[in-house]
Amino acid sequence: MRVGLADLPPQPPLPDGYEAVPFAFEYDLAVLDARNDTFAGHWGSTVYEPDAWRHLVTGSKDFRPDLSFLIVEDDKVLAFVLSHHYESETAATGVREHYATWVGTRGILRGRGVASGLLGHTLRAAKDAGFDRSALNVDVDNAHRALGVYERCGYRVDDEWHVYVLS
């Protein structure tokens, strides 16, 4: 899914009582815990161990902590949007594309507009940082209705992949 940032539609606000906290490495393991919790029931998802998490996600040269935001309560991460940017892709295409690589909300906050509000906050920050568009991947059969969250923020299906499994 993609959304152009030049004409970004009005974004959903965070619900009253919630504030976007910029990612800080002191929250790294708390974000990992939230990621493992929120993706536990997703098809094909596996648990990340700390070393793999740091190598592939928060320690990646492409990770953008300045464009990653959290909802935190008592040092527990309840929701998150983690962002990446791939310079090599920008060099090849001429388009500065922000990737909302990980978007998650713990079950206790689902259905309250937290994910849409936090993603909207992230998209405004990406626009302010000079990005042209934003992309993300989603399983359209996601049990948590993630597709609707992304559509509320202006994302539209740009490409489809079909996976077939022999059982």
Image (cartoon, rainbow, N blue to C red):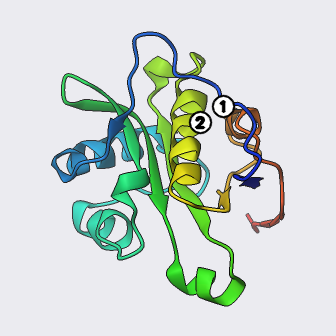
Q: Residues within 10 Å of mark 2 (few under 14, many from 20)?
A: many
Task: Mark 1 and mark 2 in contact? Answer it, CB < 8 Å.
Answer: yes
The disc at residue 11 is 1
Amino acid of disc 1? Gln
* Left/right of residue 40 with respect to residue 58 in the rendered view: right
**Residue neighbourhood size for the residue with mark 1, other residues' Cα within 10 Å, grouped as few (<14), some (14–19), many (≥20):** some
Name, please, the residue furthest toward the top: 16
Residue under the point 51% across and 69% down: 85
Provide the secondary structure element on which disc 2 rests: helix
Residue 95 drawn above or below residue 139: below
Q: Which residue is mark 2?
A: 120
Q: Quadrant of the N terminus?
A: bottom right
Locate residue 111 relative to residue 77 in the image: left or right. right
What label does residue 71 carry, if any?
none
> What type is the residue that disc 2 sits on?
Gly
Residue sitting at x 59%, y 21%: 113
Alpha carbon separation for disc pair 1 and 2: 5 Å
